[in-house]
Amino acid sequence: MKLLIPLLALSIVATSPIVIRDTNMVHRQETVQTQKFVLLSFSGSDWCVPCIRMKEQIFNSEVFISYATAQLTLINADFPRLKKNQLSAEQVKKNEELADKYNKEGKFPFTLLLDANGKVLKQWDGLPPESAEAFVEELKSILNAGS
């Protein structure tokens, strides 16, 4: 478990973050000390149409950005296919390690809400059939129930 959070923290994809954010801010200590929850998203940013729609409709919405920036540590484990979007070998390895642990079936998009220790609290298989506002309200209700 001690290895999980550093692995998550290092797995942010700089080429296509879920939310524009300084990726250097995400550290194990920040997540554990602040008890922030982790939203881990598996995506195929350049080939998975539901992944692209999820990013556009939910993750890039003002309501999500406003809420998530304060409440969540955001991680995007991206698996692009186009040569121009390829990740470094190190990043690919980290994303694959996350997939081995949390997404063994290779679902896209696949989003998980984790506590600071890496325990899965909720998962979304595919594009949620709700608005960004409803998605944020669902996150709030899960996080408030755990408080």
Image (cartoon, rainbow, N blue to C red):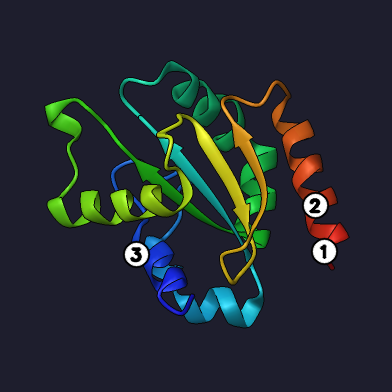
The correct choice, above or below, for 125 with respect to 95 in the image is: above
**Where is residue 60, by image quadrant?**
top right
Residue for point 85% across, 59% down: 144
Residue 24 location (% of width, % of height): 37, 68
Circles 2 and 1, Cβ within 8 Å, touching? The answer is yes
Front residue of 25 and 96: 96
Residue 59 location (% of width, % of height): 56, 37
Q: In this view, does 13 lie to the left or right of 144?
A: left
Disc 2 from disc 3: Cα separation: 25 Å
Residue for point 45% across, 24% down: 52
Mark number, residue 105: none
The residue type indicated by label 1 comes to: Gly
Mark number, residue 142: 2
The residue singled out by tag 3 in the image is 10
Disc 3 from disc 1: Cα separation: 26 Å
Crowding at dot 3, Cα within 10 Å, few <14 / some 14-19 / many 20+, comes out as: some
The residue type indicated by label 3 comes to: Leu
Residue for point 45% across, 29% down: 108
Q: Give the SS element for disc 1.
A: loop
The correct choice, above or below, for 116 with respect to 111 in the image is: below
For the view shown, which residue lies furthest in the front direction?
A: 105
The residue singled out by tag 1 in the image is 146
Residue for point 40% across, 75% down: 3
Residue 69 location (% of width, % of height): 60, 56
